[in-house]
């Protein structure tokens, strides 16, 4: 069964450094999402992406965040200058069409020191 | 999106049916009920969804009341691997509603 994959599984970085989280969505999917979950808190929506454009973003997704689909298979989340409060699990999700079921990857655990 | 209310936790005996309630009294006609679960900080896993009819798949059954103000997820024969946080999510079909809004969910512990 096709799955969403994410790399790395864990990332440790220093505050102020840039990080790029990578996701490979399911191959025929067209809509892509990033969510995050701070330890012990709810899963929160960050951004949705379709046709090389952001279709919706949350208040969390400020100018420090960006997303990109650099090629036909990868979907990335970049945090330009990490803060301590960016420490969280980051989940990528994809769906074949609008309003269809979202399938999540296993997540990247980001720790900012 | 309509707000959902779930009990924070529940226990279930292995091999027995687990019935997980969800209240969504403010649901509107264009909103679906989705259920996901999250096993120990893994990515949320899709279980089932429905609009107004009851639904069943290989994982679970979803029973939606006639007025659509509440629903119940049924795991027919709970196993230890079903221990997880279960999220009931109401999702709008309007253009701005494609995101999933997670609440606190129900932490289900399946006991031997």
Image: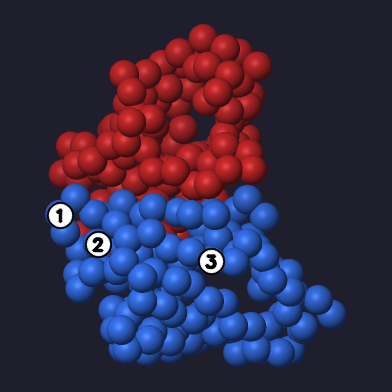
Chain colours: A red, B blue
Q: CA distance from mark 2 to mark 3?
A: 19 Å
Q: Are marks 2 and 3 in contact (CB under 8 Å)?
A: no
The image's mark for residue B56 is none
Tell me which residue sits at (53%, 76%) in the image. Answer: B21
> Is residue A100 left or right of A41 when viewed as pictured?
left
Q: Nearer the viewer, residue A91 or B11?
A: B11
Q: In the rendered image, which residue does mark 2 sit on?
A: B92
Q: CA distance from mark 1 to mark 2?
A: 8 Å
Q: CA distance from mark 1 to mark 3?
A: 26 Å
Judged from this view, the residue extending furthest toward the top is: A16
Relative to A5, say whether B67 is above or below: below
Q: Say which label, 1 or 3, has the lower sequence index.
A: 3
Q: In the rendered image, which residue does mark 3 sit on?
A: B6
Q: Quadrant of residue B38?
A: bottom right
Tell me which residue sits at (24%, 54%) in the image. Answer: B97
Relative to B10, say whether A43 is above or below: above
1 or 3: mark nearer the eye = 3
Q: Nearer the viewer, residue B100 or B105?
A: B105
Q: Position of residue A19 (x, y in %)?
A: 48, 22
Q: Position of residue B74 (x, y in %)?
A: 55, 84
The subunit letter for the residue under badge 3 reads B
Tell me which residue sits at (63%, 62%) in the image. Answer: B8
Labels 1 and 2 positioned on one and the same chain: yes
The subunit letter for the residue under badge 1 reads B
Relative to A45, say whether B52 is above or below: below
């Amino acid at each position: 069964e096709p799955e969403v994959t994410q790399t790395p599984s864990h990332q440790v970085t220093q505050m102020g450094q840039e990080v790029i989280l990578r996701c490979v969505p399911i191959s025929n999917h067209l809509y892509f999402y990033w969510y995050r979950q701070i330890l012990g808190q709810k899963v929160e929506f960050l951004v949705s992406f379709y046709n090389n454009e952001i279709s919706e973003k949350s208040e969390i997704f400020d100018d420090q965040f960006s997303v990109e689909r650099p090629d036909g298979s990868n979907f990335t989340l970049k945090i330009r200058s990490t803060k301590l409060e960016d420490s969280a699990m980051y989940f990528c999700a994809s769906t074949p069409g609008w309003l269809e079921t979202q399938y999540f990857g296993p997540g990247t655990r980001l720790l900012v020191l | 999106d309509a707000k959902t209310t779930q009990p924070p936790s529940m226990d279930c005996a292995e091999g027995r049916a687990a019935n997980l309630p969800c209240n969504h009294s403010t649901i509107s006609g264009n909103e679906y009920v989705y259920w996901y679960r999250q096993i120990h900080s893994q990515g949320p896993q899709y279980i089932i969804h429905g609009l107004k009819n009851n639904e069943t798949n290989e994982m679970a059954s979803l029973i939606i009341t006639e007025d659509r103000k509440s629903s119940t997820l049924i795991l027919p024969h709970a196993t230890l691997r079903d221990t997880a946080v279960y999220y009931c999510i109401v999702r709008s079909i309007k253009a701005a509603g494609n995101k999933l809004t997670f609440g606190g969910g129900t932490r289900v512990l399946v006991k031997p």
